[in-house]
Each structure stands twice: as C-alpha cells, then as structure tokens.
Image (tube, rainbow, N blue to C red):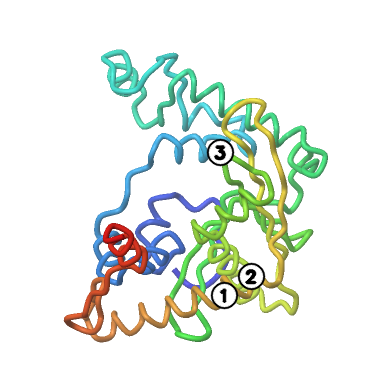
Amino acid sequence: MEPGIYYGLPLEALIEEDAVSYSTLKNIAIAPSYLKWRKENPKEATPLMTMGSATQYLVTHSHVWEDRYRDTEVARRGTKAWKDAVEDAGDRICLTEGEIEKVFGMADSIRHCPDLLEFSLPRGTGVAETVVVWNDSTTGVKCKIALDWWWEEYNRIDEMKTTEKVGKDAFAKQVANQYWHVQAAMAVDAIATVTNQQWYPTFRWIGVERKPPHMLAVRRASKATIDLGRWQYTKWLRLYADCKESGLWPGYSTDGVEELELPSWEHWRSMQEDE
C-alpha cells in the first residue's frame, strides 16, 4: 500500500501489509531476536483483548455488531458447550455470557460520558478503525498503525483502553509499562506526515474499567508524553533498520560474553547472615 489514510480496510489486509506496526515494534524492547520471532509468530488474541475489541466495535458499529461477535450464553470457555458454540458461530468471534455483560456495560459508560457526547451523535468526520501507512522521516522505515477513532473535524485521535484501573496514577503507570505513549506518538506523527498539516493532532485515551460500575476517564497525552514516545519509537526504528540491513537480530546481549554481577541486595543479605 502507498502512504495514506485508509478507511474500512479489512483486518487481513492490514496484517499482510509489509510495514512495522506499534504492536510489532514494542517487542524490540525485549530484544531484536524476539521482535523477529514474534513477527513470524503473531500472538493470538486473549479473552481480555477480545473484550476490548468487542467494546470498541459495539460503540462504533452497534448496527452490525452481531455480524462480527456472538453471545454464546455459555458461562465458561473450554467447556463442551463453549466448543459447540464456537463451532456454530462460523467466522464470528465468541464471548461468554459474563464477557458480554462487561462489554455492554463498558460501551454504555462510553456512550453516557459527558466528555464523549460525539459518540452518541452522528459521527460526522469521525471514522472508526482508520489505518494509516507512512514512511518514517528519520529512518525511512515503512510503518502502519490502526486508530480506534480519527476525528478530522477536531484534528483528534481517540484510543480506547479497557483495563483494571483508570485512576490517574494507575493509568499513567500502565501507559509507561505498556508503551502506550509510543503508540500515541506514532499515531500523531502518522497523521501529521500523510496530511502534511502544521499542527499535530490531539491524542486522547478513553480508559474504561472492565469491572462494574465500569468507571471511565478521558486522558489527553501531554506534549512531554508524546515527545518521549517519539524519542523511544525513533530509537527502536533505528535499531530495527540496522538489524534488517545487517540480517543480524541479537538477543539480550549485543556484546558477546558479559560479566555478571549479583544485585546489591544479595551482597547485603550475605553480610547480614554473617553477623
């Protein structure tokens, strides 16, 4: 695909596109060899990931939601009833009755949030499941990213996250641990690059808790957060480009045999035992 913004792109086409995504790139934080392996062996969606996708789709495509997802009315995965329901579902993605209850609860929280009234109105220029393909200006690496919502009218990107806690401190910790700030930086840079606009889009996280009463909070990524994410993904892309050019994908160690030192607490513990 050529660089640009794509609407309504089938998931299969996005997966097959030979470009680096955020979900692939973040694996290089473990090791380049792990990224290469993970790219060749994609992770299957977990039940929590499925609930998140189902919630987002229910908010934006409620009229066709049942074409993609199925309520199995089964209490637990892995049972005979579950296996029968999955077989009967065809191409639809199955959820348990408990997961369905949470999905509809989270979707209702989003629809009734005063800060998200546009989700209850005609969508206007807001487009769900938008895909952006671009060439990184620093490394030349071809990249791709899927946006939950792109609002051209407001020059804004909204990303929904279903999680355990959406309190400010807890959510900030998740952003850092999951590299969501890297995803945010890639998203705003993608839009700015393909549209040639002067102003970077605003990026917001819509965090909603999985457990009732499905508390919700909308957080806007600060400039410092985006700058840090940009620094991180540019560093990773440079490493990715080097590995791809050389054909070498190192593991944890890049300097051959390394000398190992025990942690300081082990020295302290050993000395305490001698006293």
The amino acid sitting under disc 1 is Arg
Q: Secondary structure at mark 2?
A: helix
Between the residue at mark 2 and the residue at mark 1, the CA separation in whole angstroms equals 6 Å
Quadrant including the N terminus = bottom left
For residue 73, what is the image quadrant? top left
- Identify the residue under disc 2: 226
Near mark 1 (Cα within 10 A), the count class, few <14, some 14-19 or many ≥20, is many
- Identify the residue under disc 1: 230
- Identify the residue under disc 3: 164
Q: Earlier in the sequence, mark 3 or mark 1?
A: 3
> Where is residue 238 drawn, in percent x and y?
41, 83
The amino acid sitting under disc 3 is Glu
**Residue at coordinates 34% horizontally, 18% vertically from top-left?**
85
**Image position of 71 (left or right of 111):** left
Q: Earlier in the sequence, mark 3 or mark 2?
A: 3
**Residue at coordinates 58% horizontally, 65% vertically from top-left?**
187
